[in-house]
Image (tube, helix red, strand yellow):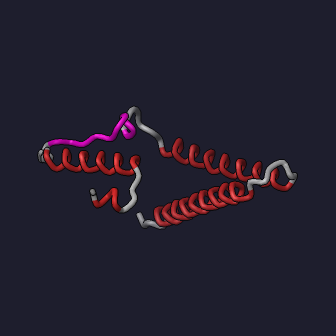
Amino acid sequence: MDKISAAGVNGNQQALLARMQQTAAAASATPLNAGQVIAPANGAFAASSPVSFSQVINSTIDNVDALQHSAGVRQKAIDMGQSDDLAGAMIESQKASVAFSAMMQVRNKLTSALDEVMNIPL
């Protein structure tokens, strides 16, 4: 009897373990050349066109606004008795809070950097 089956591991877990072992064996069998580049799947980070700083800031502000709006909708649904998903509402509220705090920290860093640039003697 195999140690894994003796430990009470079911068939799905055994199949997953076997697949992981095959992947590990395949990875260790083919060494990586020094000149070989590993690219992300689906071109996830492909540079299609240059992005301006203002576009990034505007999209970030829009994303934070959407998170806050979503949290507000969920909280309103809880308040009006239309939903009983209190955990989901709290999670959305925390996501919005973290996103807003991060955005404010970026704003503060940008403001302090601008102040430093403005105070550079010419």
Give yes or no for residue 37 being in the magenta stretch: yes
**Number of numbered discs visible in the structure rendering:** 0
Quarter that holds the C terminus? bottom left
| Residue drawn 32% across the image and 58% down it | 4
Q: Position of residue 56 (x, y in %)?
A: 51, 45
State the quadrant of the N terminus: bottom left
Is 63 or 1 nearer to us in this picture? 1
Residue drawn at (16%, 50%) of the image: 28
Question: For this view, does 34 lie left or right of residue 113?
Answer: left
Confirm whether the magenta stretch covers residue 85. Answer: no
Look at the picture and state if 6 lies above or below 70. Answer: below
Q: Quadrant of residue 78?
A: bottom right
Q: Main secondary structure of the magenta part?
A: loop
Instruction: Please state if 25 lies on the left or on the right of 10 as rendered.
Output: left
The residue shown at (66%, 46%) is 66
Q: Residue furthest front?
A: 1
Q: Which residues are magenta?
A: 36-45
Which residue is found at the position 21% from the left and 42% from the top? 37
Residue 19 position, x and y percent, is 30, 45
**Is 106 positioned to the left or the right of 76 in the image?**
left
Question: Which residue is at the front of the view, 32 or 114?
Answer: 32
